[in-house]
Each structure stands twice: as structure tokens, then as C-alpha cells.
Image (cartoon, rainbow, N blue to C red):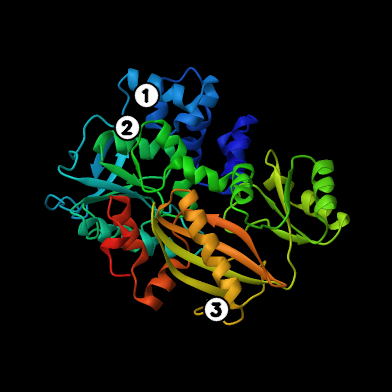
Amino acid sequence: LLKIWQAFYEGQSVQDINNITKVDPWFLNQIKLLVESNEKTPLKILKENGFSDSQIGRFLNKTEIEIRFIRKKQNILPSYKVVDTCAAEFVAQTPYCYSTYDEENEIKPIKGKKVMILGGGPNRIGQGIEFDYCCVQAVFGLRDQGYKTIMVNCNPETVSTDFDLVDRLYFEPVTFEDVLNVVEFEKPDGVLVQFGGQTPLKIAKALSNAGVPIMGTSPQNIDLAEDREKFGNILDKLDIVCPRYGTGRTLDEVIKVADEIGFPVLARPSYVLGGRAMEIVYSNEQLINYISKNADVTEGHPILIDQFLEDAFEFDVDALCDGKLVHIGAIMQHIEEAGIHSGDSACVLPPYRITKEAIDEIIRITESLALELKVIGLINLQFAYKDGQIFVLEVNPRASRTVPFVSKATNVPLARIAAQLATGAKLSDFEL
């Protein structure tokens, strides 16, 4: 598709592209019309053709927020339709909804107390589906508290998008623009971002800045855990040890950081999900080769360099926090050595090779970080254990891949309880 797009930009004809690609001319003509859109095309037409505010912003040299302001001023707003599951034989009652830039809404906002849950978005083949479990459990927890539930997700192959699970489902991309559109239409009491993995977390700060009421851990405190420098300051304050690390934007900077840390190091782009483009590097030559090999991934983004702890054991912790108390769901030990991504490794309960003193240190660190980050709901921490020393590898103030495993193994529904904590419930309300 990108090659076709580029070919039209270069002035090739529909017939020429058809001869090469064998794509039907009807589709090629439709793509050609989109390619020919430019800054002179009316805003309403661009939106009807599916262009996002950020894409239109690039046409007009404006920000996404500026385009949104102009669009709303011109009353160019999405309308919401119901997916017709009855083939027009009779009126569909299913709460499947989607947006389009049409003239009329087929639905009205839900009445009563309501909370919106942001799902995990599209799933790649091989990617874990555990966040779907967490979203479903969050729905159950909200119902326990008397709330109606709204799900925003664009993946139909999940339980969280089943027609009979939530009060209303929006098949929308989990992006700032689309989520904010639904929020402005439904006006929920709050939005939960910690159950769909990293995808909702990436837009939490922007949503909060736009006035969206984020429930649970605040975007500001989520940012403290996500920002390398800010998190490093917290670790120093709490006397917590982590592997040495650094960041470089140029080849020279990356090599200098790696030399200062000492090989082996773990190299990865700063923004990727699921462990992609990550590599353990043992020399400057291998580091140079890594950067050249991943130039398309790393372009414009800093590369993170971490000290790699060889032959270390890795541990995962899932915990709950209500801002004052912390409940540790489980301490798991990975079967593989530290360095295998948590999405590719196996773990067991209880941990099988660790001292009592080290477990006590893991508990201390978990409790102090959860309280320092003012977590309301779930938190996941990853640790390495080597030569009697505990190192913090990563902290995520959200649901994790291991939550379903822990919940089923211990018979404590962590995600369900976490959703209730976000609405104001306390850990003392539950028999844990």
C-alpha cells in the first residue's frame, strides 16, 4: 500500500500501477483520490475520507490540537452508528458502535454512573492477550460498584469486545483523537487506562491535559515511572539499586555510554513495545552493527543502554495499592535467566531459588515504590537477583501479562479489585 501511495506521488498512472501490482483499478482510483488530497481540500471532506487530525495537521503545518479546535469550531464532529447485526431485518439492539463523519447519531449517551475502559488495541500475532482478561475483570469490578461500563477497543477478536459484556462498545482506535471524541460524546465519570497495557498509557497524559477524568493512578505519576531521569531520582531517594543505564541519540553518544557502563549491555529503542529490536551487546563492533541494522526503528529516537546482568535470576511482582496500603499478589520467579523478555519467558509460583532476605527486600521495594508513585490499582515490578543483590529492572503502574496467572493461581481477582480501588474502594474492604 505504501508503494502504491508513493507511486501516485511520483506521478505514475493508474494503468502503470495496475500492470505492476495487479491491484484492481477501482481500488487504485480510490487510493489516487486520497493521495490527491491536500491543504486546499475542505476539512469536512478530509475527515469523511478518514484522515486523522494529526495527518491534516501535517497538510496545514498545524498541531493535532489546533486542527481539533478548528474542526469543533466548524461543528465537524463524528456521529456514532450501530453495527447492524440483523441485516436490516429488524432494529439491532446490540451495543456495537462506530464513528463516521455523517450527519446523524443513531445512539444517545448512556444515562447514569458510567466508566470508560480503554482496551489494548490491535494485537500482533504472537502478542499476549492477557490485557484482554484484565479489561474483562475491570468490567466485573465496576459492576460490583454500580457503574455502567463503556469499552473502547478496535480488536473484535477479544472477549472484552463481546456484545454481551459491556453496556456499550465503541469499535474505535485507541488513539488520543478517537478516545477524546467518545469521551466528549459520552461524558463518563471517569476513564480507566491501566488495564489495556502500554497502548492506553501512551495517551493518558494527553487525555488528562485535555480534561479527561483519568481514574486510578494519575498520568503524572505514571509519567514518573516511565521517565528514565525522574524514576532514577525516585530510586536514589528510596535507596533502591538498579542496573547502570544511559541514553544516546547519536552513534558516538551510544558508544560512549556503553563504554562507561561496561559490556555486556542491553540495547533498545526508547519507544518500542513487546521487546522488539532489543539486543544483548558484547562489544563496540556489535553495538555499531546493531544500530545500523535497526536504523529504521531507531531513527529520531534515543537508544537506551542498560547494564546487562549475566547469569542473574529474574522475578516478577504483581501488587495492588490504594494509596495507603499495599497488597502483594505474588512474587514469581522466571525459569529463564534475566534478559528474556517477560512476554517470551515462563514463571512459577512460589519462587524456588532466593533467600528470605532477598524476598524481604523485594517486598520493601514494592511497597515503597507503590506508595511513592501514589498507585491506585495495579502495579507490576520486575527484579533481577545476582550475588545476593536485588536490582529493580522495571516498574509499570498498570496491569501486566502475569495478572491472569497470579489471579487464577491464588484465587484473588487482582484486576477486578483494582478497578474498584480506582472508584474509591479501599484494600481493607476486601478479605486479602
Mark 1 in CB contact with mark 2 (< 8 angstroms): yes
Foreground disc of the pair 3, 1: 3
Q: Where does the image place residue 209, in percent across and percent down from the top left?
A: 42, 31
* Residue 348 in view in this figure: yes
Q: Residue 258, image x and y in percent?
A: 81, 51
Q: Is 176 displayed left or right of 351 in the figure?
A: left
Q: Is residue 282 left or right of residue 363?
A: right
Q: Which residue is mark 3?
A: 351
In which quadrant will I find the C terminus?
Answer: bottom left
Q: Residues within 10 Å of mark 2 (few under 14, many from 20)?
A: some
- Lower position in the chain sequence, tag 3 or tag 1: 1
What residue is shown with label 1? 44
Q: Is residue 344 visible?
A: no
- Residue 405 location in percent, x, y? 43, 73
Q: Residue at x 40, y 25 (%)?
A: 68
Q: Earlier in the sequence, mark 1 or mark 2?
A: 1
Residue carrying label 2 = 101
Q: Which residue is rendered at x = 49% and y = 79% of the image?
A: 349
Q: Are marks 2 and 3 in contact (CB under 8 Å)?
A: no
Q: CA distance from mark 2 to mark 3?
A: 54 Å
For residue 125, above or below residue 306: below
Q: Is residue 196 left or right of residue 280?
A: left
Q: Quadrant of residue 196?
A: bottom left
Front-most of residues 408 and 70: 408
Is residue 135 depicted above or below 328 in this figure? Answer: above
Amino acid at dot 3: Pro
Q: Which mark lies nearer to you, 2 or 3?
A: 3
* x and y percentages locating residue 119 in the rendered image: 38, 53
> Local crowd at mark 1 within 10 Å, few (<14), some, or many (≥20)?
some
